[in-house]
Every structure is written in C-alpha cells, then in structure tokens.
Image (cartoon, rainbow, N blue to C red):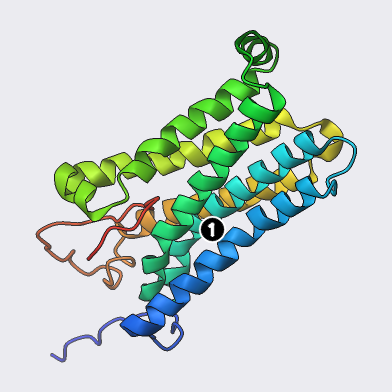
Amino acid sequence: MHPSPATPRRAAPIPLPPYTPGRGMLATIKIVLFAVCLIPALRLATAFLGDGLGPNPIEELQKALGFWTLTFLWITLAVTPLRQLTGQHWLVRLRRMLGLFAFFYGCLHFANWLGLDMGFDTELILDDLTERPFAVLGFVTLLLMAPLAATSSNRAIKLLGGKRWQALHRLVYAVAILGMAHYLWGVKKIALTTPLIFAALLVVLLGYRAWDRARRYTPAGRGEAPGEMPRVVPTVTVQPVRFMERPK
C-alpha cells in the first residue's frame, strides 16, 4: 500500500531580499534619521519665533507637538510589522531612537502646556486639570512613557533582566491607547478627521499584532499541514512590540 501524498502547503509570501547594513552604513542611517526626526521641532521653533503659527501660537504649538508625539509613537509601533512583512530585520535597530523621539516630543508637548500655556501657575494648572480632564489623561500617558525611555539603555536591560524588561515595555500598548484617547477627547467635533486617521492606524497596528500572535498558536502558523500531529517544541516565545530596542 502506497503512502498517501503529503498535503501541499501554501507557499509563504516572499519578502524583499534581506539586507543587513554594515556598521558604518548603519551609523550613517542613524545620523540621517536623527536629523530627520529633529526637523519638526526645528520648523516649529522657527515658526513660533517668527510669528508663523497664527493668532494663537501657543495653542497651535501645543497641537503640533501632540501630533508629532503620536506620529513617532505610531512609527515605533510599525517597526515590528514592517520587519516581519519585508524581512528587513535591521529595521529593529532604529526602534530605540524612534521611541525616544516620541518621548522627546511628548515632553515638549507637556512643557509647552506647563510653561507657555499655564505659566507655571499652580492655581491655573489645577483649574485646567479640573475643567479639562483629558489633560490629566495626557499627563498619565507621559508618566507611562517615562520608564520606557529611562530603561532604553543596555545597562537598564541587564539590571532588569529580559523577562521583566519585556513586561515593562508592554506598557507601550497602554501608552498608545491612552494617547489616542487624550487626542480624541481634546479635539473639537469639527476637527475629527486627523484623530480618526490616527485611530484607524492604531487599530491596524494593534490588530496586526493580535493576528500575528494568534496565528503562532494555529497549525498553519506553526508550519503544520492540516491533520498533521503538532510539533513538540520546548518553548514558544512571542516577541512583544517594544518601545525601545533590546540588543541581540
């Protein structure tokens, strides 16, 4: 009796040709990326000092800094899906810088509100937090970002240990959701287009991560044919989306 032929498996999508930049090229890429990430801050500073932000420059500056905070946070979240879909694993080496710039613009966003908008007036700050609860939500979001930025160094990873470091950096999900809620809550109903675009992108990013995690526990995700006995593996490691880069 002849054995039945194996069930053909569906071919996996072919990623882009893998590319690993050398140390010098990677350093150049990081320098260029650093300069590009600074462009929004420089343009906003120039516009603010040159009266180019309209009749209410402090409010416009506040909105712009919040926009760039979420933009860099979303780009940070997109690194892992891009790495997996394209096969360009070196992209993960840029994630730490992108995450730190998200925190940088978040700090500028907070400093603008605290200093230029509130004038460091304690009574005015408390009144604003009472009348506009979304400001409290933004402050909580920034507080959650702080430990992620503080533990971005290799030394911090060694001190915390891999598992605790990974668990801590899962806070990026809470940061993204709370930041999105802060944005939606703070805008007027007639200006919802951009926040809704951010919300849709966040749904896609988090949805991809949920799908990727779920498929790892299915036979197809483990590379098994239908009806095939599950493969025995010692452990299954699911890599979370990290706010910062963990060295390999």
Q: For the C terminus, give its image quadrant.
A: bottom left
Secondary structure type for disc 1: helix
Residue corresponding to mark 1: 75
Task: Name the spot of residue 4 as percent of width and height, x first.
Answer: 22, 85
Residue 170 in view, yes or no? no
Tag 1: Cα neighbours inside 10 Å, few (<14), some, or many (≥20)? some
Q: Is residue 209 left or right of residue 134?
A: left
Residue 192 against residue 207 in the figure, above or below: above
Does residue 76 appear left or right of residue 5 in this picture? right
Residue at the (73%, 41%) spot, across then down: 61
Most extreme residue toward the front is 49
- For this rendering, which residue is in front, 141 or 232? 141
Q: Residue at x 68, y 21 (%)?
A: 118
Q: Give 70 or 231, whichever is nearer the viewer.
A: 70
Whether residue 95 is visible here, answered yes or no, is: yes
3 lies above or below 110: below
Taking the view exactly as shown, the residue that stands out farthest to the bottom is 2
Amino acid at circle 1: Ile
Which residue does the image show at 44% across and 84% down from the upper left? Answer: 14
Q: Is residue 180 left or right of residue 190?
A: left
Quadrant the N terminus occupies: bottom left
* Residue 125 vertical placement versus 14 (above, below): above
Write down the quadrant of residue 88 in the picture: bottom left
Q: Going 9% across and 59% down the picture, which residue do you hit?
A: 234
Depicted 84 relative to depicted 204: above or below:
below
Q: x and y percent of residue 52 in the render?
A: 85, 49
Instruction: Find residue 207 and report its horizontal and vertical position in percent.
Output: 51, 51
